[in-house]
Image (cartoon, rainbow, N blue to C red):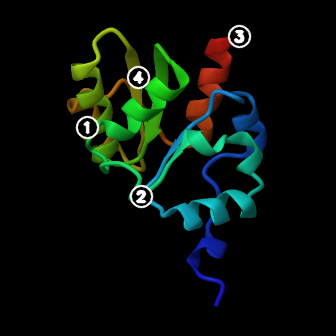
């Protein structure tokens, strides 16, 4: 059987991601094989260096800041934007920033309802959006 990964749809289109190339990294709870398959199916593999992907079992899982720390150190980033969709994503960013005050990571959450907006804003997230595509397009405009 093909599996559920074949029924998934990407949360962002390739053209939008290309706007950030080569400064793209990925933190996922997927295994390495699942991640590689997902990237291949949607033709995203050329956008991510192997060392720019943190997958399940590689480091401590979110909300531990280890995945974010690995990427910040590996690429020497002083600033970054992290977009997630669950509380553990924001907690990872928050914990990273508490440890590394000299570097700034802005954390955003993709939400599906007004209730989620209120919840995450009360948690102190830097921004909310109703889709990854919208969040990234906003960042592209701010970059210009």
Q: Specify few, some or many for label 2: CA neighbours under 10 Å numbering under 14, 14-19, or 20 or more.
A: some
Q: CA distance from mark 2 to mark 1?
A: 17 Å
- Is 45 left, or right, of 50 in this rendering? right
The disc, 3 or 4, on the residue closer to the chain's N-terminal end is 4
Q: Specify few, some or many for label 4: CA neighbours under 10 Å numbering under 14, 14-19, or 20 or more.
A: some
Q: Which quadrant of the figure contains the N terminus?
A: bottom right
Q: Which quadrant of the figure contains the C terminus?
A: top right
Q: CA distance from mark 3 to mark 4?
A: 18 Å
Please tell me the numbered disc located at residue 56: 2
**Nearer to me, 94 or 119:** 94
Q: Are marks 2 and 3 in contact (CB under 8 Å)?
A: no
The disc, 2 or 1, on the residue closer to the chain's N-terminal end is 2
- Is 109 left, or right, of 49 in this rendering? left
Q: Quadrant of residue 100?
A: top left
Q: CA distance from mark 4 to mark 2?
A: 23 Å
The disc, 2 or 3, on the residue closer to the chain's N-terminal end is 2
Q: Specify few, some or many for label 1: CA neighbours under 10 Å numbering under 14, 14-19, or 20 or more.
A: some
Disc 4 is placed on an element classified as strand
What residue would you read off at disc 3?
144
Q: CA distance from mark 2 to mark 3?
A: 34 Å
What residue would you read off at disc 4?
106
Q: What residue do we see at 23% from left, 30% from top? A: 95
- Is 120 left, or right, of 10 in this rendering? left
Q: What residue do we see at 65% from left, 13% from top? A: 143
Q: Are marks 1 and 3 in contact (CB under 8 Å)?
A: no
Disc number lying in front (4 or 2): 2
Q: Can see residue 49?
A: yes
| Horizontal and vertical percent position of residue 46 | 77, 45
Q: Specify few, some or many for label 3: CA neighbours under 10 Å numbering under 14, 14-19, or 20 or more.
A: few
Q: Quadrant of residue 118?
A: top left
Disc 1 is placed on an element classified as helix
Disc 3 is placed on an element classified as loop
């Amino acid at each position: 059987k093909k599996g559920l990964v074949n029924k998934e749809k990407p949360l962002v289109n390739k053209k939008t991601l290309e706007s950030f190339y080569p400064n793209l990294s990925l933190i996922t709870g997927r295994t390495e094989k699942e991640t590689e398959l997902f990237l291949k199916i949607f033709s995203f593999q050329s956008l991510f260096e192997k060392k720019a992907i943190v997958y399940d079992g590689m480091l401590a899982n979110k909300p531990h800041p280890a995945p974010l720390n690995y990427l910040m150190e590996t690429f020497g980033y002083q600033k970054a934007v992290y977009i997630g969709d669950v509380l553990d994503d924001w907690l990872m960013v928050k914990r990273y920033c508490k440890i590394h005050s000299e570097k700034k990571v802005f954390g955003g959450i993709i939400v599906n309802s007004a209730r989620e907006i209120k919840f995450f804003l009360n948690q102190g997230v830097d921004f909310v959006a109703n889709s990854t595509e919208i969040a990234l397009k906003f960042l592209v405009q701010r970059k210009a």
